[in-house]
Image (cartoon, rainbow, N blue to C red):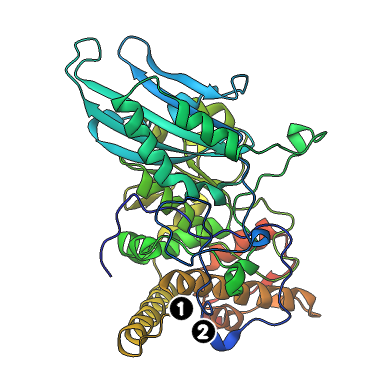
Amino acid sequence: MGEQADDAPLLFWAEGPGISLPEEAPREAGWGGPSAGKAAWKGSPGSAPGEAASAEQVEQDQIVAVFVVTFDSRTGNMVEWCLPQDIDLEGVEFKSMASGSHKIQSDFIYFRKGLCFGLACFANMPVESELERGARMKSVGILSPSYTLLYRYMHFLENQVRHQLEMPGHYSHLEAFYDDKKGVLPAGTPASQQPIHWLPSIHRYMYPEMKITHPAGCMSQFIKFFGEQILTLWKFALLRKRILIFSPPPVGVVCYRVYCCCCLANVSLPGIGGTVPESKPFFYVNVADIEMLETEVSYVACTTEKIFEEKRDLYDVYVDNQNVKTHHEHLQPLLKINSADKEKYRRLNDQRQMLMYSQEVDGDCSSCEEDLFILFFMEQNNRIFQTLMEVSASQDKTLTADHARGMGLDPQGDRSFLMDLLEVYGIDVMLVIDNPCCT
């Protein structure tokens, strides 16, 4: 598979409200079933002929703000224009223009602002201006309560940021866009009670008419980048730890890693995880987010600011490019790749090879690598929790080494992981895998 450009949209399909689940999952279709049609909005650049979804299948537009951020050589980042004019955009000037962006020509950034998610496209253009110190830098962005629809406007934002660089102060296209796409949040609903829509129901991975297709190569790059360490990230994600990924700009591709990391923790069994915080992507964060992060008990985020590494109270796991580390002593054992991890990684790669072979030889495109990746970890998670729930419902509530192996875990190497898992999810079982004779 060829390398994927960093400017690929985060999602190509999003389901809207009101679709009922089919009675049975189409298992004969393979991992993800026949590929669903990609949703397209009127005039959406890049939409292939015939790529359309019925009105009830497309998530409704809810663009609550559109804005332009500029870098001023005297005052720094600032919001130069926005609609609506009275919306609170405090901090957006830093979220939509990542620290260190002056070293690159273009980027895109996903971020969270209060109860909304944002997407901004950044561009840097050389100019013959002493006042601007030879460079003009701007970002054009949008806010929405749901990040699954932001991808639709990637190309529009890319075009508009170029337009703003070449013709500063001309906002007519952005005004027309906002008038056409603006959404109204539910009336009478206090801001604190408004739902945050980030990752759609897991059922959308199971049924083709509801599936989300990730950018081609997104998961593949994630696996190649981290290798066996995705099993380490998987454990931390399942334990709902605060995971912070550091990388220098561009940050767009790192936002994909945040999303992929969240996908490791999917569980489709009913009744699992109701008392634990959801694994949610915060995408890009910077020093302006420190106060917010201090209150979070679980998140996955990325940053370009190295100073975060020193603020250990803000995270449990720090990922410096490919180096995964934690300062918590009780989490240190989870950093070690054990035999069961190696076996899982081997099986994942074997399935990927089989999929690519079937696509190349048989021309079978009904399944994709992204489906395989998500379902591989979801099935692994389901197997673990199914076993744990069965043991907790038994008379003696005893979890043995054989149970651990049956879950695809190493009885000794994954003991601390299992103990944390039982505590986090409040599952009442007794571990009896301390004695080497039991292994």
Q: Residue at x 24, y 35 (%)?
A: 104
Q: Residue at x 61, y 81 (%)?
A: 403
Lateral position of residue 159 relative to residue 381, left or right: left
Q: Position of residue 1 (x, y in %)?
A: 28, 70
Q: Are marks 1 and 2 in contact (CB under 8 Å)?
A: yes
Q: Position of residue 43 (x, y in %)?
A: 47, 50
Tell me the quarter of the picture where residue 48 sits: bottom left
**Mark 1 or mark 2: which comes first in sequence?**
2
Q: Amino acid at mark 2?
A: Gly
Above or below, 360 against 184 in this view is below
Lateral position of residue 398 relative to residue 232, left or right: right
Q: Report whether residue 241 is seen.
A: no
**Looking at the image, how many numbered discs can be counted on the residues?**
2
In this view, the residue in front, 45 or 184, is: 45
In this view, the residue in front, 140 or 28, is: 140
Label 2's element? Answer: loop
- Gap between marks 1 and 2 measured at Cα: 6 Å
Circle 2 Cα neighbour tier, 10 Å, few/some/many (<14 / 14–19 / ≥20) = some
In this view, the residue in front, 193 or 315, is: 193
Q: Position of residue 432 (x, y in %)?
A: 63, 74
Q: Which mark is residue 30?
A: 2
Q: Report whether residue 99 is seen.
A: yes
Q: Which mark is residue 254?
A: none
Q: Which mark is residue 367?
A: 1
Label 1's element? Answer: loop
Above or below, 80 against 179 in this view is above
Q: Amino acid at mark 1?
A: Ser
Q: Residue at x 27, y 28 (%)?
A: 102
